[in-house]
């Protein structure tokens, strides 16, 4: 399986997944760079997978659909996403070639947000739920929901690769250093991420092992602690 990161808009990542002669575009916030990245590799996008309804994740889906792709997304958000062919809910499977992703319901950022988990390949696409060193804002859900999501992610094998929807890691790392000032793993990762971003390097994918050690939201002991971190991060200026 080949996975290609495609920067779109200001700080989003769309993802191309290529396997078994098939290509999926996941969360194409705009079409042109995603289609161009596929064409440069001789790939034709046959499917679009969407994690949630926000325009910076679905903005290019219609144009790619018009070129012949089938679009799959959260059943709970079907009224907010135009042109879904396949409605996905907790426990459903969706395939690219002979590889199957299981759907996780991970509400909080939006009410119907989903993630795509390839268990046999130890990778997961988390959209705007789990970020490197962070989590999504609680626009449509609760801290309890997000904490449940974080517990579920934390239970994955530590080598699981996490592909999220934004390059937020430097801001998240700066906040994490304030939230857990005595955490030496966070301090070391902040230094690494700072150096990477100064060189224009991406910080995604991350791993569950890294998040267990350095993500204050994943490390929150209960919903109240996560809520405190989320409110502080929302106001953070660092």
Image: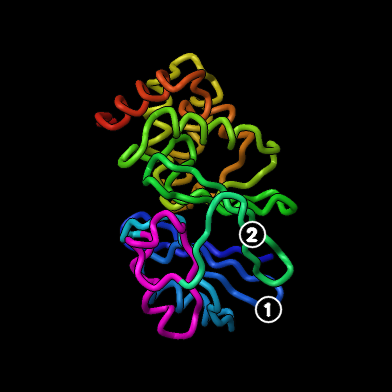
Check residue 65 for magenta coloring. Answer: yes
Q: Which residues are magenta?
A: 57-84
Quarter occupied by residue 57: bottom left
The answer to whether residue 180 is above or below residue 11 is: above
User: In the image, what residue occupies the spot 52% across and 82% down?
Assistant: 39
The answer to whether residue 229 is above or below residue 150 is: above
Circle 2 residue: 93
Image-based side of 56 in relation to 184, left or right:
left
User: In the image, what residue occupies the spot 37% across and 32% down?
Assistant: 142
Quarter occupied by residue 171: top left
Crowdedness near tag 1: few (<14), some (14–19) or many (≥20) residues, C-alpha within 10 Å: few
Label number found at residue 21: 1
Check residue 94 for magenta coloring. Answer: no
Crowdedness near tag 2: few (<14), some (14–19) or many (≥20) residues, C-alpha within 10 Å: some
Query: Which tag, 2 or 1, sits closer to the chain's start?
Result: 1
SS for tag 1?
A: loop
């Amino acid at each position: 399986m080949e996975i290609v990161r495609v920067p779109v808009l200001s700080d989003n990542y769309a993802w191309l997944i290529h396997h078994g002669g098939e290509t999926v575009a996941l969360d194409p916030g705009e079409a042109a760079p995603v289609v161009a990245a596929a064409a440069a590799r001789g790939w034709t996008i046959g499917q679009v997978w969407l994690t949630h309804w926000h325009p910076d994740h679905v903005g290019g889906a219609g144009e790619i659909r018009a070129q012949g792709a089938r679009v799959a997304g959260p059943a709970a958000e079907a009224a907010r996403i135009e042109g879904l062919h396949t409605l996905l809910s907790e426990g459903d499977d969706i395939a690219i070639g002979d590889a199957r992703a299981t759907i996780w319901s991970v509400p909080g950022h939006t009410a119907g947000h989903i993630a795509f988990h390839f268990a046999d390949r130890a990778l997961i696409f988390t959209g705007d739920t789990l970020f490197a060193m962070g989590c999504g804002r609680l626009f449509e859900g609760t801290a309890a929901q997000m904490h449940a999501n974080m517990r579920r992610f934390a239970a994955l094998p530590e080598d699981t690769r996490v592909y999220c929807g934004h390059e937020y890691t430097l801001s998240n790392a700066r906040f994490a250093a304030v939230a857990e000032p005595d955490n030496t793993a966070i301090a070391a990762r902040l230094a690494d991420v700072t150096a990477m971003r100064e060189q224009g390097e991406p910080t995604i994918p991350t791993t569950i092992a890294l998040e267990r050690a350095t993500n204050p939201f994943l490390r929150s002991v209960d919903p109240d602690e996560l809520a405190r971190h989320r409110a502080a991060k929302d106001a953070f200026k660092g």
